[in-house]
Image (tube, grey):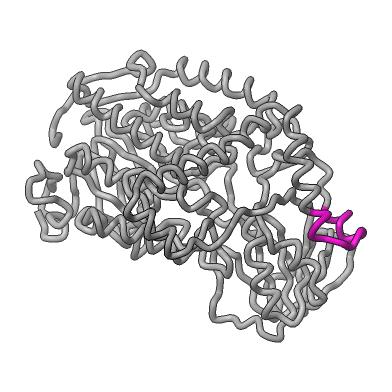
Amino acid sequence: MTSTESAHLSPDASGSHTTDATSTVEPDVLVVGAGLAGIGMAVALLREGRHNFVVLEKADRVGGTWRENTYPGCACDVASVMYSYSFAPNPNWTQMYAEQPEILDYIDAVAREYSLDAFIEFGSEVVSYEFDEQTDRWRVETRAGKVYRPRIVVAAHGALHNPLKPSFDGEADFGGAIFHSAQWNHEVSLEGKRVAVVGTGSSAAQFIPRIAEQAEHVDVFQRTANWVLPKADRKLGATERWLFARVPLLHSVYRNIAYWTHEVPVLAFMNPRLVRLLRFAARRHLAKQVPDRELRTRLTPDYEIGCKRILLSNDYYPALCRDNVELVARGVADLTSTGVVTDDGAEYAADVVILGTGFSTDNRCADEHIVGRDGTSIQQAWRDGMEAYLGLAVTGFPNLFMIMGPNSGGGAQSILFVIETQIGYITRCLDLMDGQGATRMEVRGETQREFNAWLHRRLARSVWNSGGCNSWFLDESGHNRQSWPGTGTGYWRRLRKPDPAAFVFSAGSMTGR
């Protein structure tokens, strides 16, 4: 074993081991990604007494999306007390909705508390996954050529990590800077510049108010208006933080209030007749913050609230009312050397173009080399659209679990609650395998089909599928491949205990367990 490999084992670990003197490592579990999902999975393994694992991270530090997204104003739209692990409550949040630097510091702190650096391989981007049916192990290779042969793979690389960048014919001719919000170029000063913002989603709603204070002029290009609700944000004072640290019960009360506050909107999403209450609140928020009737008209969506992601903001509408900001209710068709051209042929001068165009979500594994049983690729398995069992397991891909896989996204609930629910399910599946002496665990094809038939019947009655809009929840066929058809509580109940009858178990080689 090389010194690099041995660093990933605690002193009492039974041990991942090399199969030769070069670079092949055989951990029991391989976790891909060191964002909130990967860090949570690693901690869960340690808490379960499982030390024989490795975490692969393509970057040079933990953090996932909170490491990558550094745009001005980047913040969470879930209350901070809910946007933390249940096993690592943070009493030190400085505001009700934490911003990116504070969240990244929290993730770093959790990784340090559990000494996870000993288990993480930084700078390790996975380029290939292939299941070996002779040994019931995966062969996972990194871009650097290092090979791992884990018994279990947990894909924790997130659903929103590939920036969606529209292609413009004149992009090469544009004389200024152009970048995506998820790849913010901090070397580009916006002082005194004319800035064109393409897109008005959740990221844009956060950075537009900040850049409007710097730029000479900002043109915001909006294809589709968004529903916006007020954000119950405020500073958390020193007294509150002191009480949180010394009276854990108080922190727990805040967390429970936040949890149920995020659950309530989902009931409306699943029953369009109840959604009128949300619509009323959003229209009232718009009327209070935008006095100009013509601008208000352009900002009023023509689809049902909840069909697309609802924005939470107190400063987005006021930013659009500034004298140096113009909302252009048209899409961008092309770029020129000096600016942008809209769908109707109008030209707008720009020194900087910022793409607030979101992420690619249709098939998050479209470009990944993942080959399962019988040589089936993930592209073949998902040729008709992404599909999994409980958002976690895919038939044809034994011993592979996905965190935040297809249809596990919460409608309004904290993604960390969903992540922890899935992590608990995965650890119980590992216990099932160990209890049965199994080296292979695969969801049954009929189980996955029945589950997805039920899921899409439920979704067909929800606002996500019947709200009259195109959103990133839907794929090209119009099927919702992102949302769980119910509350976070319902998802937690469904995942409390794995059903052994839903899986096929088999025992082959037990080498390296």
**Foreground residue among 74 and 255:** 255
**Foreground residue among 38 and 512:** 38
Taking 442 as reference, is 379 above or below it? below
Residue 351 % position (x, y): 72, 80
Horizontal relation, residue 131 to residue 376: left or right: left
Q: Main secondary structure of the magenta part?
A: helix
Tag count: 0
Horizontal relation, residue 412 to residue 33: left or right: right
Taking 482 as reference, is 509 above or below it? above
- Residue plotted at (18% across, 48% down): 25
Taking 435 as reference, is 112 above or below it? below
Residue 84 % position (x, y): 41, 49
Horizontal relation, residue 60 to residue 489: left or right: left
- Residue plotted at (57% across, 40% down): 261
Q: Which residues are magenta?
A: 286-299
**Foreground residue among 144 and 190:** 190
Q: Is residue 298 visible?
A: yes
Residue 87 % position (x, y): 32, 44
- Residue plotted at (41% across, 62% down): 104
Which quarter shows the C terminus? top left
- Residue plotted at (78% across, 38% down): 304
Confirm whether the magenta stretch covers residue 414: no
**Quadrant of the rendered structure where residue 509 is?**
top left
Confirm whether the magenta stretch covers residue 295: yes
**Foreground residue among 371 and 287:** 287
**Quadrant of the rendered structure where residue 407 is?**
top right
Residue 443 % position (x, y): 39, 22
